[in-house]
Amino acid sequence: MTHIQLSHGGGGEEMNRLIHSLFFEAFGNETLLQSEDAAALHIKSPIAFTTDGFTVSPLFFEGGDIGKIAIAGTVNDLAMMGARPLYLSAAFIIEEGLALEDLRRIVASMSAELARSSARIVCGDTKVVPKGACDKLFITTSGIGEIVYGGISAHRLCAGDAIIVSRDIGAHGATVLAAREGIGIWGDLRSDCATLWGAVAALLEGALSIHALRDATRGGLAAVLNEWAVASNVCIELEEEAIPISGPVRGLCELLGFEATDFANEGTFVLALPKAQAPRALEILRAMELTCNAALIGEVSQKRPGRVILKSPWGSSRYLELPKGELLPRIC
Amino acid sequence: MSLQLRDLYEGFRDAEVIKALSKRITQESEALREPLHVMEVCGGHTHTIMKYGLKQLLPQNIRFIHGPGCPVCIMPKERIDHAIDLSRMEDAILCTLGDMIRVPGSKGSLAEERAAGRDIRPLYTPLDALKIARENPHKKVIFFAIGFETTTPMSAALLDAAIKAGVENLFLHANHVLVPPAVDAIMADGRAKVNAFIGPSHVSVITGSKIYEPLPIRYGTPVAVSGFEPVDVMEGILMLVRQKNEARCAVEVQYTRAVSREGNTKAQALIERYMEPRAHFRWRGIGDIPHSALRLREAYAHYDAERVFAEHLGNEPIDDHKLCICGTILKGLASPKECKVFGTACTPSTPLGSCMVSSEGACNAYFRFAEV
Amino acid sequence: MCLSIPSKVVEIDEHNVATVDTMGIKRQVSLDLMRDEVGIGDYVLIHVGFAMNKIDEEDALASLAVYKEILEAMDEEERRRSIEADDACEGRA
């Protein structure tokens, strides 16, 4: 047997074998192995709870795969709320005909990514749908974390805050776009897909007053900052030149007419905290490999509440808008 | 000193140079006897002006009037309806470039048709249409070809490759338009206050700067053919200011690293072989302009989707949405901000008019790169 | 429609297709529309999958040199102005 068949989702023997030989093998922990209808958990602290569906195409790309994103994405959502990731669920919707080898690679990658934080998968589900009913594999993960640093919120930015981005932006969006069939573009692109709990934990230990924290996933940096500006009714003023963008991401944007600020990230976050604490935050971040390109990109003011302003090095400025519509190449 | 690739980008976006040019322009424009109303003909320049905030670096007496040089913007609704009708034919695959897929015709947009199940594919290069035709020998593959002189040679090259490969299920729907007749139509109308031109960058790479030589003679307007980088545009403006101050009017080329007087003669010859001027073409907003677009020559009629599938296509002119002023903007008579629905009923995600769709449309550029 | 990006030719195959590099991003483009001979290391402008022309390196360098002169002239002007301003102050004193 080399490919997933409908019978693997039938609830019978084949499904049992798949769950035991693949999922239990990779994710095995006491709670999961109980195989109850639901996982019984004991948590005393306030918790953060999140869920996310993953549908990335292609399944494998430079720097990651759908499994790695499914773990990192949910762990990061918890981390961004100041919560230590504890328990995850994982639901797999598999298209009939998916190569078993691909599924194995994805599950192994999930297992490796779990090891980068304190999170464990404690419950799950598998469904197999007929060919054409989904695109190879969709994964949904939910997560619970214990809040160790409360009060982080998109509503808490205030004038005088510094805005820091944890690394160069747009790597994931650019990598996945270039990997799509038919586009015929390749190069030194690598997704930023990563678990950010380590970097967040280091910041939390640094005795900083973190006002807001968010990973810049879909909609990119532009979406996060616009949401913050609206939620806190403040103006965010960015120095365009200070935003780190790698050469290849810049090249792809030039070629297809995109803006790197619109591209999705899967291991890049934005941080708002009082300006005086920015040097300390940068020092902490730059000491770690994942965030060694962290940069101060702007600050919060009251100039135009609800808006994000990009300032050019030659003295002009414009609004940074939310990305809109399908990302079509600007060939015209 | 040898040239590095990064010089071609950074050298022409250098902040200090932009500031210095801005200062020069401000100093020298004091001597202007009348305000300079510069039409940047090409949508690519509109994009650069807005993205880099160049309007903010110019004195009060220099204004931009945005031109008609955005091929998606000037496409009238009946042509978009052609694309939709072609995509609805049995066994059809409709291919086109980029933003075209989002422009609304009278029956919706190609994006909506695609969602409804038609096989519509946005391409990165026209050559992909040939690949698709080969992979689908039993389907009719139609390339809805759009673009100014820059993009016409690529459509001609596609046809050339299809003929050489003996592929017979590929058809072109040609909407290739020409810059000079459109500029003439705007100037002949007389209402646009244009007294200087920034000439297109890449149209000129293909055609050569010679195509603008009638402009100074006919209209007494200086022309500066400029590149698309911010330094290029600023230097082009400075060249226009100097021509005015010295009471000269001529075609000057700022974009010397890419534009010659003669242009790319090989590309021109390829166009000449396969295409000929149409008697008329209707432009959105501007209306009918004689000899302003190309179609396939009679000898290649069997590759021409308009002729082969004529029975499926209507030809009645269809007007724009009542509230949309794209037409007035394309004629150089209004700025996007004068439109009542700009940014409210009409945004890039819910466009009423074509100028909001294309990233080179004036409305889209004003929306995306709004000035503070 | 007129987006066109300077890129460097890094490879040319027997079908007249070049691999070009734009800041570390590579793609293949047809050289069928090129009038002049193209070689490895040349800079070309590409548009929807085709190279449109070669960038004239001498002209590009000449433009960059002009900008350098403008900057130097500006610096010189500023310097002179600040000296004049100083002189004016001394004159008053």
Image (tube, rainbow, N blue to C red):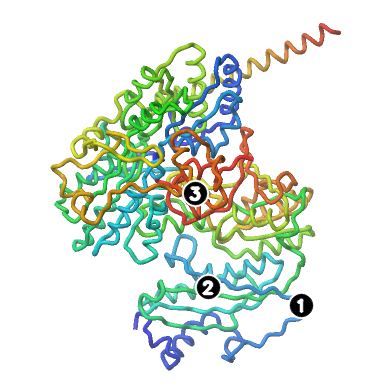
Looking at the picture, tell me which residue is in the foreground, B17 or B48: B48
What distance separates the C-alpha of mark 1 from that of mark 3? 41 Å
In the rendered view, would you say A146 is above or below C66? below
- Kindly check if marks 1 and 2 are in contact, taking CB atoms under 8 A apart as contact: no
Residue B87, horizontal then vertical, whole percent: 29, 59
The amino acid sitting under disc 1 is Ser
Residue C36, horizontal then vertical, whole percent: 27, 31
Residue at position x 19%, y 56% in the image: B169
Residue at position x 54%, y 38% in the image: B50
Residue under numbered circle 2? A110
Q: What is the residue that sits farthest to the right in this orientation?
A: C93
What distance separates the C-alpha of mark 2 from that of mark 3? 26 Å
Residue at position x 38%, y 85% in the image: A6
Q: Left or right of B237: which side holds C3?
A: left
The label on residue A288 is none
What distance separates the C-alpha of mark 1 from that of mark 2? 27 Å
Q: Left or right of B159: which side holds B26?
A: right
Callout in the foreground (1, 2): 1
Q: Earlier in the sequence, mark 2 or mark 3?
A: 2
- Kindly check if marks 2 and 3 are in contact, taking CB atoms under 8 A apart as contact: no
Chain under label 3?
A
